[in-house]
Each structure stands twice: as C-alpha cells, then as structure tokens.
Amino acid sequence: MTDRSTLAVQKALVAHLKRRLKQHIPQTPELDRYYEEFRRELTDFGVPSWPGELLAALGAAQVAYVGDFHTHVQSQKLVDRLLTMLHDEHRASIARDPSRPPPHRVNVLAMEAFLSRHQPHLDRFMAGECTSDELLELVRWDRTWGFPAAGYLRILETCRDLGIRVVGINSTARGERTLHRRDRHAARIIARLHKENPHGLVMVFIGDLHVAVEHLPARVLEQLARRNRTIQDCIVYVNPESVFWALAESGLDYIVNIVKITHRQFCVINSTPVARYDSYLRFVEGVIEEDDPDDFAPASADVADYIRELAGRIGRFLQLSRLSLPDVDIVVWQNPDETAQQLATRLDAPADSPARVRAASLARHPLAITDSSLLIHSFTLNDAADAAARLVLQAGGWRQRFLPAGRSFFGDALFEALAYFASKVINPKRACKKEDDLRQWAKQSHSSRRVRKAVNVGAIERFVLPHLSLLATLGGDSTNVPLPTLPAPRGLTLPARMEVTRVIGHRLGEKLFYYAHVGLPSRVATRRSRDRYLDRATLSRTFRQPPPTEADARRLYLELWKSAAQVQEHHDTRAKWL
C-alpha cells in the first residue's frame, strides 16, 4: 500500500517528467482528442482480477488488442509473456481433456512496429532467411519506427519459436486525421487475418491510444460488419496512469496488478507512471542505447543532476532535514576499451580500486570508488534510484567495505537493504529475486550457458538460501526468542561477496518496504497494533546513524529481520508475474 507521502513523491516526479516532455512532443488536436477518448474509458479501475481470468478472456476471444508504450520495454515483455502463456494453456487444455474445445491458439500477431508493405522482409526473417540486423536494415527501422528494437526483436523470436505468424499493420499516412487513417488501414488487415484464421486468435500489439474501444476495435468491427461477421474481442490496457493512481489511492497497488473493467476490457499494471514517462523522456532526449532499451548513454544526459534530483526526493520522503548530499561524480562505465586500471587511474582512486572495479563489473554492483565518485554499470530508472539512495546513505555516514572473511558483511548488507528500500520510493514496482526465484536461477545456471554466471552458483546454494531460510523462522508474537547464531559468509571471492550482499540486502529491503508501507498507512485502531510497524522517524534515524561496529551492525541486521520476517509480501515470485 502506498502511503500519501510516497504517492506524493510519485506524482511530483510524473509532473516533473511531463513538463520536460512537453518541450519535445508536439501536440495536435487529433492527438488530444484520441487521448481524451482513451482517458474516458479508464476513469475507474473496475474490480481486481488475476492472470487466470485474463488468460480465459483472451483464449475465448478471436481478436485481442494489447497496448504498447513504445519506449517502455515492460510493454513488450508483457506481450512476449502472454504469447507464451496462451500457447502453454492451449496445449495444457488439450492434455487435460481432449474432448473439450481448447482456448483459442494465437495464430497471428499483428504489430504496429512494422509497415504492411514490408511484409516480405518480415516473412523472410520469420523463416530464418535473414538476421535481425538485416531485418532492421531492410525495413529501415530507424526511419519507419525508430524506437528501441530489442523488445520487439524478442517478441519476433518468441513467435518464431511458437510458430506464430507476424504481420505488419502500420502505414505511412500523413496529413489530417493521421491516427484515424492508420487505424482504418490496420483494421482492414486485421479483418482479413480473422477471415483467414476464424478459429484462432489474432493478437494485435499497437500503441496504447489505438486500443481504446472507440478507436481501432471500432474500426475492426466496422470492417467485419460489412462482411456480415461478428467477433468476440478483448482489450488489454497496459499501465494506464489513471488506473495506477486509483489503485494506489485505494491501497491496492502492491496487491493487484490486473483489473477487469468490463467482460472485454482488462488492465495490466506491471510498471509505474514514473517508469513510463522516464523511458519516453530518455528516448526523446536521445539517451537510450539501441542495443539495450533500459540503458542511458551517459554522454547524452546530465546523469549527476538527475540522480541528485531523485536523492532530494528520497531525503524529503524520509524527513531528513538539512540533508547535505555529497558532491559525487556518477561514472557509468560502458567503455570496453578502458580497463579497470585505467579507470581507477583516471579517477585518482586508491591502489586496491582496480580489483574492486573488476569485481563490481562482474557482479554488476554499484561501487563507491572514491568518496567523490560512484560507479554504476547501466542507467535504468532502477539504477538511477539506487544511485540516489546511495548518495542519501553516504550523506548519513554509511559506507560499504566488502572486507574478506565476512568482516563487514552485516554492515554491507544493511547498506544494501536501505538503498533498495529507498529506491522503491522512486519506483515502487521494483522487485527483487525471492527464494523460489533464486532456486530456479540456480537450477537454470547448472543447465544453461545463457544464464549469467559471474557469481559462483555455489554461493547462492551454500550460503544465501540457507541464510534466508534461517531468517524466515524469526518473528512471531514472542519477543523473548533469542536471535540466532548467524555466521557471516567466508571463503568467497570479492565478486561473490558483492553479489551475496546484494541479493540478501534486497530481500531485507523488500521486507522493510512492506513493513513500513503496508502497515504505516493502515487505519489501525490500537497503539499496540501500530507499534508492530516501522515508523518513518525510526527509518530516518537509521539512515543518519550507521552502526559504529560490525557487531552493532549484526545486532541491528537481526533485529530488523526479526521485526519484518512475518510481514506479508504481496508480490509473487517473478515466475508468476505478467
């Protein structure tokens, strides 16, 4: 549940991002009208739903529309996952009862990202006759679409694996009523695809404004009516801003990520308005790298100012009066030609810095190389929020040391937990790997070369999972249960120490977030019940007063785990998300 002050941080950031976007995006009367018609459909969030109900509605439809926010990779990830889940559900239904009609199988994916006249090139790629780079060149991606390609290419690969045909539905309409003319062009193609696949599902992936009932779905129904055909359709809105705010103000934003508006209209919330508008701003300002849609190109953005802006908002949320942020250079290390030694020399870092930089690179871990430089490895919204949280902690006197033999483990883990907690003030939808995710990751790492193995999997299996299992036994109503003997990890390489600290710290940070935010805004009648939750004054003191010794850090670490161990977390494991 988002409390009022967290919600205020989110809304203030969205307003800030929108003001900057207005400098880049020309508004037209048609665009304003399309947006207003879209907004009218989403004035209320309806009722909470769940993946099974959404998949059933999609499986019963003949045409389904899924909204795309072109710069935000979460939209593309959702479609990729829906295609796989619908394919699996179709096969599972046949296996369960061959005598019953299974849900419709996705036969065709219609994509706005490709012009219809480029269909021969798309067919060549789907047949394996050209590479992804060749496809982008053939369709002149930079000129005809221009948005980061990675998320869309991932969808094409999934469709190729599942035997789903992909069809381009976009056109180069110009002049007045461009959006309407593009919808009519797409509708003619979709109607034809339905005629060719009357017993299957045609899924349409197109910009979110187009999926409003009065827009493309209405144009498709008009085309079918001319042929005396009717269909059952389904619309999936993805991360609409109004629905997110309505859920947040009702205290449901961490519990509900699918809502049902009508029998044919659903919303999926897998991101925040801040993340959406942040991705668009980075795109229009030319700071998204083409090979990774989540990353900033640091040469094109004032990274430090942006992070300091986020750090200030975190400080105000935590009520840290007179917060003096350190003057720190943010170093996004993405130059493959620069060695760790050269980077350390350029930053005038201590003698042991090259080894620490190499370890941080392997573990993808942020690292304070000096008191005036913070190293990060990419620049997603989560990276920016994480770096901002580290500035706030550094202002309070916190440091991470990563000493061998576990001599600083508890202090380092506390630092990581607080940084993760504070980053979720900026992006509440940020989530970490839970225990089931870690087990699945370890299993996959043994059998697949595609899983990143920078860190010894044994560290996860031998230390992290047993450590978290022991901590999960803490809590309950009894205050007299002694704290367990909990050894620090030993015998780990520096990259493994960093990754272990990060994984465990994130789990504690997630617990603290629910411990503070689910309980704090609850209208609890008794003081005794209120005392079960973490108040902001305690949090503020923790950010300002780091434990003076490792023994003190261990004591605080266990006390926080004991307090938060039984807190109900509403996010499921990553494997079950949409």
Image (cartoon, helix red, strand yellow):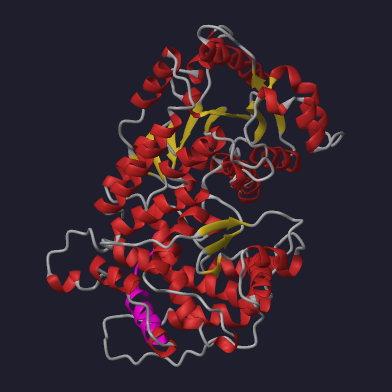
Q: Position of residue 317 (x, y in %)?
A: 29, 57
Q: Is residue 558 magenta?
A: yes
Instruction: Name the residue nearer the viewer: 359 or 200.
Output: 359
Which residue shows up at 60% across the image and 41% down it? Answer: 288
503 with respect to 544 (left or right): right
Instruction: Name the residue nearer the viewer: 133 or 40.
Output: 133
Instruction: Name the residue nearer the viewer: 386 or 207.
Output: 386
Q: In this view, which residue lies farthest toward the right?
A: 129
* Rendered position, 120 above or below 563: above
Question: Is any part of residue 423 visible from this angle?
Answer: yes
Quadrant of image for the N terminus: bottom left
120 with respect to 409 (left or right): right
Point out the stretch of residues depicted in magenta: 554-570
Q: Position of residue 264 (x, y in %)?
A: 44, 30
Q: Position of residue 138 (x, y in %)?
A: 80, 26
Instruction: Name the residue nearer the viewer: 332 or 567.
Output: 332
Q: What kind of secondary structure does the magenta stretch mostly adopt?
A: helix
Q: Is residue 388 magenta?
A: no
Which residue shows up at 42% across the image and 61% down it? Answer: 389
Which residue shows up at 69% across the image and 28% down it? Answer: 142
359 with respect to 486 (left or right): right
Q: In this view, which residue lies farthest toward the left?
A: 526
* Rendered position, 359 above or below 427: below
Q: Position of residue 200 (x, y in %)?
A: 64, 30
* Rendered position, 144 above or below 484: above
119 with respect to 366 (left or right): right
